Image (cartoon, coloured by chain):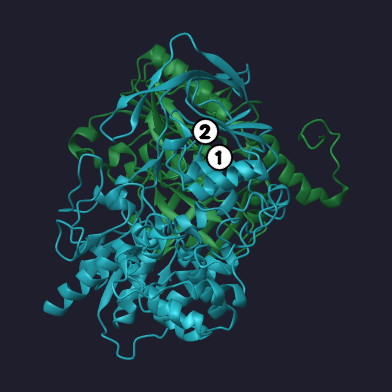
Amino acid sequence: MYPITRAEKLADKIFLMDVEAPRIAKHCEPGQFIIAKTDEAGERIPLTICDYNREAGTVTIVFQIVGASTHRMSLLGAGDSFLDFVGPLGCPSEFVKEDLAVLKKKRFLFVAGGVGAAPVYPQVKWMREHGIDVDVIVGAKTKDMLILEQEMEAVAGHYYPCTDDGSYGHAGMVTTKIEKLVEEGAFYDVCVAIGPMIMMKFVCLLTKKLGIPTIVSLNPIMVDGTGMCGACRVTVGGAVKFACVDGPEFDGHAVDFDEAMKRQQMYKTEEGRAYLKLTEGDTHHGGCGHCGGDE
Amino acid sequence: MDVLKKVPVREQEPKVRAANFEEVCYGYNKEEAMEEASRCINCKNAKCIEGCPVAINIPGFIAQVKEGNFEEAYQVIAQSSALPAVCGRVCPQETECGGQFIRGIRGEPVSIGKLERFTADWARDRGIKPQPATEKKNRKVAVIGSGPAGLTCAGDLARLGYDVTIFEALHEPGGVLLYGIPEFRLPKQEVVAREIENVKALGVKIETNVVIGKATTIDELMDEEGFEAVFIGSGAGLPKFMGIPGENANGVFSANEYLTRNNLMKAFRDEYDTPIARGKKVAVVGGGNVAMDAARTALRLGAEVHIVYRRSEEELPARVEEVHHAKEEGIIFDLLTNPTEILSDENGWVKGMRCIRMELGEPDESGRRRPVEVAGSEFELELDTVIMSLGTSPNPLISSTTEGLEVNRWKCIIADEDNGKTTKEGVYAGGDAVTGAATVILAMGAGKAAAKGIDEYLSNK
């Protein structure tokens, strides 16, 4: 069992938890992920690591409710435990292994969308700890949906919040903020974009035009997370890669986002059905036209 | 009674079992087991033992079964095998013990597997456990992977008194016995979990959710956690795909994924969250045991299922029994057929598969006749799900994070067949991680050999 030492609601349907997992906390690096499972009947949920404390032996995760398993996960509080918690999985961000002197000469732009702020945070924090100031754009639908603001501001060189509805910070999508910064004379050697697939796709289209090499972190459907099932295969530069062992970070300009987005829909109706079954119980008989429970 | 013929074994009716996940074979009862055991001629030069990769004293246990001494029979098997209830069900007796058979020269060989299964189940039902070591050695050995190789190696070392910890990457122990082989061939709760309990009863500790190479490394286990030797039984986990166009369409799965969702993650049970594509028309590409397992699983989930295999029936690598069961249940065999492209609809979902007919030409390096395309014979199969069952290769996670551990060009760990010794001192390996995908019993044989190798190494250290 893996005890939860802290549990907080960050925004509507978005939760943060610290989990005791000493083996993971000892070895994890920015860019890697874990897989959590609440109970016997739950799914294995892959989540990018948001933070870690090697001394306390804890790992921080942030997740959004998308189906029945994440719903049950959200009901857990401090003092409760995960049945299973495995990691760190995937490869660390490339810069972790890079020569620090070379790294210090590079200008980094981090772009996060929605819950993507969680995996971006440890990377920005790592940069700060190694004496590198980076620019960070974080986008959300509205001000209420913006997460980890104070934390991010504390470790970023420049922090630029954006909201789609203009309720806070820059009004508009993260891509318009990137354009604006570049127009105003900012120069970047590397962009790291993490968020919804559609956001990463549009950031990559833009940065390709602007000539900024871009790293994205993919979160496709996966089961084991160790290379065994092949569910997470993505096409990168024409070659098939397994996001769990070859990634999760890839050259964004080489990723086939359209295929990746289609693959992400694979269980959409099934996940939704499981969630509805849980929340509506026996009263759910389909007919809503959304969840596919009509058949 | 005709001594030349096996006592027939009772099975679930094909039509009934095609719609459930209950075990296909019921096994022998007491009377049937004793009758079958009486067919053993107890030859002096017992070829069956030579044929058994874990060298069970086969005539010895059968003699006890014949007399109705089932507990004694169980302890004879337990001397050599930690997983008799598993082996009795999935071991290819026709090529191992039964293939060497003297009785088999005249008449059918004794149903060794069914007798082993009966004995193990009998002992389980009465709570009889293997005998743990009386003297503890107080020396730590780590075993990586809780599949057949790891469990066997751990069991043997524990019986010798070593302090053994198994590290398992998944959330439950059992490896391929759990995620790969389906419930209807190998029940998880009543058989796999119980045999693992028996291994634990020998004193073996199991730590799940630890990915060696990520959560910790072999070097750390040896340098920081005090393990004096390590056995790698991590299996051959990476699924192969064909590399044909359209293979990433929604509805194309590796057999590993399909089986893992159903077996480990229990998608077939309503109370589990796991989603699975319940196809209406499914093609399974490949002809091995795993292909049969995937096909029969899809059938039970309600699909019309086709096995698509590029050679003919004679070359099917699956066990004859599996092919026979699959056919009985209504699996359609599209033999001498090879896929060339997966076709999908505008939303990216599989709608069909383009195939080409094959014919057999000259034998290739494997000795089997090479399948060659018949020009102009392309056709389309209408489908909604494709399961690729083309074999697996070893996962590089461990080899790439362990200094001094060498692999061959197929990424298989190089290890001595006789004792499991690798190129790194104190590190042993066996099973699919060394040989590439093979059988449960060969992995157990390798685990056994490595346990002996480790004991020799530590005794002389």
Q: Residues within 10 Å of mark 2 (few under 14, many from 20)?
A: many
Mark 1 and 2 residues: CB-CB less than 8 Å, in contact? yes
| Quadrant including the C terminus of chain B | bottom left
| Residue B112: x %, y % from top left | 46, 67
Image quadrant assignment for residue B207? bottom left
Q: Residue at x 43, y 78 (%)?
A: B61
Circle on res. A115: 1
| Quadrant including the N terminus of chain B | bottom right
Q: Residue at x 53, y 28 (%)?
A: A197
- Identify which amino acid the numbered label 2 is placed on: Gly
| Residue B457: x %, y % from top left | 15, 72
Closer to the N terminus: mark 1 or mark 2?
1
Circle on res. A36: none
- Identify which amino acid the numbered label 1 is placed on: Val
Image quadrant assignment for residue B365? top left
Please name the color used to draw chain B.
cyan
SS class, disc 1: helix
Most foreground residue, A76 or A236? A236
Name the residue beneath numbered marker 2: A195
Note the chain letter of the green one.
A
